[in-house]
Amino acid sequence: QVKLVESGGGSVQAGGSLRLSCAPSEFTGTRYCMGWFRQPPGSGRERVGSIYTSSGMTRYADSVKGRFTISHDSTKNTLYLQMNNLKLEDTAKYYCAADQDSEASCLGDYWWAGFWGQGTQVTVSS
């Protein structure tokens, strides 16, 4: 059974940085989609970005472009989310997600994963 375990959340002041990590277990092969979603308090879950592991191609939400970077280390099979210049509105629970989808689906407008981590809280304060 696929398990996704996030780490790296915490509290930071606005303008600061955090890096989240996600290590999937039982997820083998090289062609799959991984990504990060977030859910602010009282709101629905939204995609932050996704990456197709075999090509390294990425897609980001407009709200994080230029500030967040998704990467995947194939040697460690670990997904990262580097978050810089954090804003108050980035406060949310962040979820790692993965699934065996096509690149087109992964980078398209409506990718939704079949496997999820338990989430890690990111809190940005002024």
Image (tube, rainbow, N blue to C red):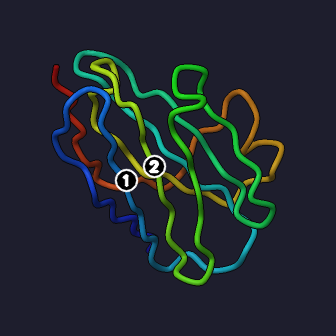
> Residue type at mark 2?
Gln
Residue 85: image x %, image y %? 39, 31
Residue 75: image x %, image y %? 59, 84
- Determine crowd level at label 2: few under 14, some 14-19, many 20+ residues with C-alpha closer than 10 A: some
Give the quadrant of the C terminus: top left
Residue displayed at 70% across by 46% down:
58
Q: Is residue 85 left or right of residue 50?
A: left
Element at label 1: strand
Residue 48: image x %, image y %? 51, 34
In depth, the one of 56 and 15 nearer the eye is 15
Residue displayed at 55% across by 56% down:
98
- Determine crowd level at label 1: few under 14, some 14-19, many 20+ residues with C-alpha closer than 10 A: some
Residue displayed at 24% across by 49% down:
9
The residue that disc 1 covers is 19
In the rendered image of this protein, does residue 82 appear above or below residue 99? Answer: above
The residue that disc 2 covers is 82
Q: Is disc 2 in contact with disc 1, using a CB cutoff of under 8 Å?
A: yes
Circle number at residue 72 = none
Residue displayed at 51% across by 33% down:
67
